[in-house]
Amino acid sequence: MNNRFPRLPYVLLAIGAVLFLFGSWWGLFVAPAEVYMGEVQRIMYVHVPTAWNWMLAVIFTFISAVVFLFTSDYKWDARVEAGLEVSSLLAFLLCCQGSIWAKPTWGVWWDWDPRLTSVAVLLFAFLGIVALRNFVDDAPRRAIWSSVATIIASVDLPIVYFSVKWWNSLHQPQSTPETVSPAFHLPLRVNAFAILFLMTGFIMLRARIASMRLANEVAPPPLVEAGEMA
Amino acid sequence: MRGVVTGGWAYVWSAYSLTVTVFLVYAITLLARLRQERR
């Protein structure tokens, strides 16, 4: 996808930046303050879209890992590498934004609550896989190990999603149009699309870097002989 | 009123500034790495 549309990631990043400026301006200066949380609730317009897109990035990485194991096509390994890094970036951002929001509302920067803990577990698992990839020089081995590790780590994603339902959590349940006032919908949706465009542009550029680096290495041998996988 | 958070703009600006900075720095590192790989 990268080679056919070389300028696409830059276009996506530009659209994402414009949408993010608009959504943030609306969220900061136009949308009303929330009744109980006051101005602090405006953090929602970056925190919730970051959370949604982080989940999408983890799902993308998981799918890329599965497809790589089935096809042994290295473009999917490049996508795994890109997905791991961008997911880690979004998870880091998510934890920091949540922490900033937690201090004035919960009174603490961090709590070992099921939602926060499960997000942190996935962040450190993905960072570990990123580190693992840097230590393994053998391309086929690196690709297989990191794909398997990604699939295992991704099991944490449903735990993150359902943690607020399964356990007694300080964190509020999932936001839906029914639980969020209509006055807050526009900046929330605009920033969700903004971060979606930014995330997609980042993943495409990062996958391009991974592909170029792989091409610069010695051409990897085929993982298996034809028909051996069956 | 009790149970109502007052003020807090500093937290809001911190969250938005952090988000913009992280995206901007990451975009710059991506472009730098892309340029490095092309050499």
Image (tube, coloured by chain):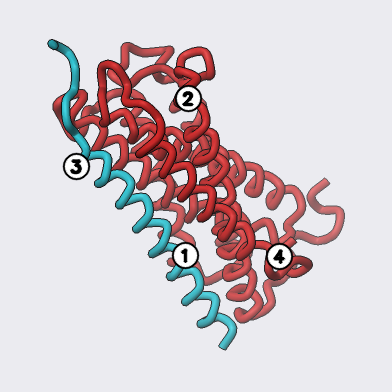
Q: Which mark is residue A2?
A: 4
What's the distance in space between the residues labelled 2 and 4, CA to CA? 31 Å
Q: Are marks 1 and 2 on the same chain?
A: no
Indicate the chain on which mark 1 is placed. Answer: B
Query: How many neighbours does mark 1 have within 10 angstroms: few (below 14), some (14-19), or many (20 or more)?
Result: some
Residue holding disc 3:
B10
What's the distance in space between the residues labelled 1 and 2, CA to CA? 28 Å
Q: Which of marks 3 and 1 is nearer the N terminus?
A: 3
Q: In this view, does A55 lie to the left or right of A35?
A: right
Q: Do the residues labelled 2 and 4 touch (CB within 8 Å)?
A: no
Looking at the rendered image, the disc whose residue lies closer to the viewer, 2 or 4, is 4
Front residue (pair A28, A149): A28
Q: Are marks 1 and 4 in contact (CB under 8 Å)?
A: no
Front residue (pair A69, B19): B19
Query: How many neighbours does mark 4 have within 10 angstroms: few (below 14), some (14-19), or many (20 or more)?
Result: some
Indicate the chain on which mark 2 is placed. Answer: A
Residue A214 in percent (x, y) is at 62, 73
Query: How many neighbours does mark 2 have within 10 angstroms: few (below 14), some (14-19), or many (20 or more)?
Result: some
User: Mark 2 is on which residue type?
Assistant: Tyr
Where disc 4 sits, the SS reads loop
Q: Residue B27 carries which label?
A: 1
Front residue (pair B34, B24): B24
Where is the C terminus of chain B found, in terms of image quarters? bottom right
What's the distance in space between the residues labelled 1 and 4, CA to CA? 17 Å
